Amino acid sequence: MTALVELDGVRKEYRGRRGAPGVVAVDGVSLAVRAGETTAIVGESGSGKSTLVRLLLKLEPPTAGTVRFRGQDLAALSRTGLRAVRREMQVVLQDPYSSMNPRMRVTDIVAEPIVTHEPGTGARRARPALRERVAGLLESVGLPGEVQDRYPHEFSGGQRQRISIARALALRPDLVVLDEPTSALDVSVQAQILELLADLQTRLGLTYVFVSHNLAVVQQVADRVAVLHRGRVVEEGSTDAVLRTPREAYTQALLAAVPDPDPHRARRRRAA
């Protein structure tokens, strides 16, 4: 299967201040994200997941290595070329409330990427068509189009995450990075959002990069998994292979830390 995104020997080092030693957040990561699949990046807090996402989206330049999208080196693109690529790469963040401007109505939140990338769509004469487009996006994520005149605080956490997803889909991207998209939600709402994401992927042919520390969720949604530890990929492969028969001690430790609802089975696992 064709790789949509390729990372080749990517490294990110942050310089220390006032003579302090630098910090290597990502160290020699090579990874391929296949078109139409969900690739999960997992690891504990501080493992380098968020830094890797910023590098993948060209929000920061790598210290070394190459990030390619559809075979194009992102570092070699002009500002115009990078702007065109950004249409095809969108992100859904962990906290749907903090990622929205509370003073903006939903219609403007969802329309913001459209107005930014499609000149003229924000003009007064174009507003009826833009509102109709926003209504369609909201309906595609399970919200009625009529809610677009409301503000973020008027919605539940799950509804706000649906709005975030609608905004990410506004430019019809090929790649959507999901950065802990369900960790701030109740378990029942998590299931609904995961079901929505799966349905959208099937209908729209989306490629997902799913960043998470929740291995139970990863096992449910991902085709492939990359395990990140201290900035390095220590294990990578199909979800079934990595999570059922992990080779690396770090992956085994992550799996052992997953809570088990059966107390007897949990005790047996700890004893083993």
Image (spheres, rainbow, N blue to C red):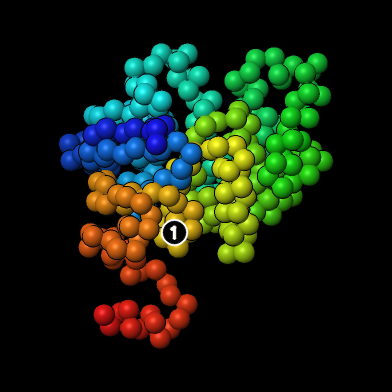
Q: Disc 1 residue type?
A: Gln
Q: Is residue 71 left or right of residue 156?
A: left
Near-viewer residue (133 or 63) = 133
Image location of residue 183, percent across then percent down? 51, 57
Quadrant in the rendering for residue 101: top right
- Residue 211 showing in the rendered view: no
Give the vertical position of 152 relative to 10 (above or below).
Answer: below
Residue named by callout 1: 219
Mark 1 residue element: helix
- Residue 140 showing in the rendered view: yes
Q: Residue furthest bottom?
A: 264
Q: Residue at x 33, y 57 (%)?
A: 241
Give the vertical position of 241 relative to 258 (above or below).
Answer: above
Quadrant in the rendering for residue 209: top left
Image location of residue 189, percent across then percent down? 62, 59
Give the vertical position of 82 relative to 223 (above or below).
Answer: above
Image location of residue 80, percent across then percent down? 47, 13
Image location of residue 222, percent across then percent down? 45, 51
Q: Is residue 52 left or right of residue 162?
A: left
Q: Is residue 146 left or right of residue 198?
A: right
Q: Residues within 10 Å of mark 1 (few under 14, many from 20)?
A: some
